[in-house]
Amino acid sequence: MYGHVIEETRQLGSCLELCSFHHVKREGNKLAHSLPRRAVLSADMDVWVEELPEDLDAVFQGDLAM
């Protein structure tokens, strides 16, 4: 299902002088999981400059603590 995305990412990474990929489980990166969920639930277009909304900032701070 995501094979084409993975392959394109590998191809783009090979163009860089140094690039490495590491798998991070959802529990270790809840912000990446929360962003698309928020996008689906939001009818508006949100733009954030320099600061995350409070609810997402709390998720981000939790990721840093892990």
Image (cartoon, grey):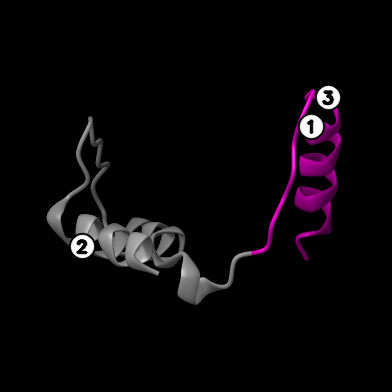
Crowd rating for badge 1 (residues with CA inside 10 Å; few <14, some 14–19, many 20+): few
Determine the residue positioned at 69% across, 57% down.
22
Observer-nearest of 46 and 62: 62
Magenta stretch: residue 20 in it?
yes
What residue sits right under mark 2 in the picture?
Answer: 58
In primary-sequence order, the first of circles 2 and 3 is 3
Figure disc tally:
3
Disc 3 + disc 1, Cβ < 8 Å: yes
Look at label 3 and name its amino acid.
Cys
Real-space CA distance between mark 2 and mark 1, rounded to the nearest whole angstrom: 32 Å
Q: Earlier in the sequence, mark 2 or mark 1?
A: 1
Of residue 62 and residue 50, the one placed in the foreground of this image is 62
Can you say which quadrant of the picture contains the N terminus?
bottom right
Residue underneath mark 1: 12
* Residue name at image x 35 percent, y 59 percent: 64
Where is residue 34 shown, x and y percent of the image? 37, 64
Q: Quadrant of residue 47?
A: top left
Please provide percent x and percent y for residue 33: 45, 65
Residue occupying the point 60% across, 65% down: 24
State the residue position of label 3.
15
Label 1 sits on what residue type? Leu
* Residue 59 % position (x, y): 28, 64
Of residues 32 and 64, the one drawn nearer to the viewer in this rendering: 64
Q: Is residue 3 left or right of residue 63?
A: right
* Residue 33 among those drawn in magenta: no
Which residue occupies the extreme bottom position in the image?
27
In the image, which residues are magenta?
1-23
Asked whether, in this view, residue 19 is left or right of residue 33, the answer is: right
Identify the residue at image location x=86%, y=32%.
14
